[in-house]
Image: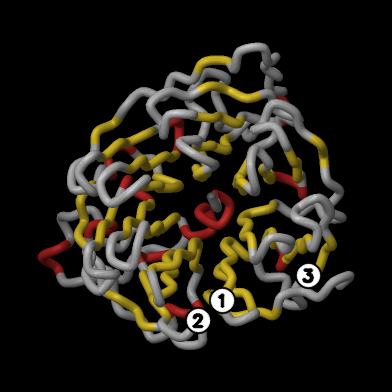
Amino acid sequence: MRRVLVLLALAAAPQALPQDLDAEDPAAWPSIIAPLAVKSLLIDLARAGSRVFAVGERGHVLYSTDAGRNWTQVAVPGSANLTAVQFVDEKHGWAVGHAEMILRTEDGGDNWQRVHFAPENQQPLLDVWFADTEHGLAIGAYGVVYMSADGGRVWSQIPFEPEPLAGAEQVPADEEGMEAEVDLGFEFHLNAIERGPGQRLYIGAEAGRIFRSDDEGTTWRELPSPYDGSYYGILPLDGDALLAYGLRGNLFRSDDGGMTWTGIPTGTVALLTSAARIDADTVIISGMAGVLLISHDGGRNFTLTQQEDRKAISAVLPSGDGELIVAGEGGVRRLPIPAQGAGQ
């Protein structure tokens, strides 16, 4: 997910609304159509057919029909900061965020329904994944997992009880190197969930933890980890290959479904936030401080580039016409794909 930019969004309080709404949690107030929403803090991107969606602070939801050149904001029934969005086709999508807010749409994002909202739990949801139009998971802070089997209309919290992977040694986390709020129990933050081949899912989490499910989330097991810092994303590649990335520029590759890992030099200590596969050979990883890492050999080696404005990039998506769409501190914009051998 995105957690550092999520923390930045905490400072963005909803604007004042009429007095009769004062009794409600401000996160329940409808989002406000803002002329500068396209330049606000936007945290995640997703494609829905010919549309691209961006979500972020104050419940902002925007879409583009021209590969990210122009954007239209959509009103939604909530102003909690949104952390993730996913579509399974051009019509069905979901967004999650703070106050455990979950939104769903079944008309391509023109209209959104708030289907779950629990500010009393004081924990954000950080990512969402659906296998199809009916079955999905939402994950977040302190090990929370919600499941839906009816297209996201109703959500039920389920326990997250991963088992150690058979034949693998668990690498214990270093308490001193972990974020202050992490508990050594199972109340760590689940930051990102991604689909692998077949029914396989991966979760990247705090305290150097990576989890794999081979049955679409019914059961989970912990994978060995090459370091004890937080993972903010997983990018499955071909077959059993995948990349895992996180704090201080740490990037690792596995070619056996996460059983063994090799570190990849990145040339940066910036937190890595998001990744996208452009084609069979080209992989992009984004990060804080305007970092973009590019690989032209299928994710085996990366070259560092950095935007002059140094604004954090939270999500990256291929535009479909030879460029990138990125979201983050600078809002949402298009950037050229770094060329072969490009440097800082």
Residue 324 drawn above or below residue 127: below
Instruction: Give the number of the disc on residue 163.
Output: none
Counting residues from the start of the chain, the first of labels 3 and 2 encountered is: 2
Disc 2 secondary structure class: loop
Closer to the N terminus: mark 2 or mark 1?
A: 2
Residue type marked 2: Ala
> Which residue is at 44% across, 73% downward?
52
Residue 124 is situated, as x and y percent measured from the top left of the image, at: 40, 45
Q: Do labels 2 and 1 touch, CB within 8 Å?
A: yes
Mark 3 residue crowding within 10 angstroms, few (<14) / some (14–19) / many (20+) = some
Q: Is mark 3 on a helix, strand or loop?
A: strand
The residues bearing labels 2 and 1 have C-alpha atoms spaced at a distance of 5 Å
| Alpha carbon distance from label 1 to label 3 | 19 Å
Query: x, y percentage for residue 297?
Result: 80, 58
Q: Which numbered disc flags the more N-terminal residue, 1 or 3?
A: 3
Which image quadrant for residue 103?
bottom left
Q: Which residue is drawn at 45% across and 30% down?
A: 143
Mark 1 is surrounded, within 10 Å at the Cα level, by few (under 14), some (14 to 19) or many (20 or more) other residues, namely: many
Q: Is residue 23 left or right of residue 192?
A: left
Task: Please say if 251 is above or below 54.
Answer: above
Read off the residue under disc 1. 319
- Left or right: where 65 falls relative to 21: right
| Near-viewer residue (173 or 109) | 109
Which mark is on residue 67?
2
Numbered tag placed on residue 306 in the rendering? 3
The residue type indicated by label 3 comes to Gln
Q: In this view, does 304 lie to the left or right of 102?
A: right
Q: Do we see residue 288 in this rendering?
A: no
x, y (%) of residue 46?
A: 45, 64
Q: Where is residue 163 shown, x and y percent of the image?
A: 51, 15
Residue at 64% from the left image edge and 60% from the top image edge: 277
Query: Please, what is the three-letter code of the amino acid marked with disc 1?
Result: Ser
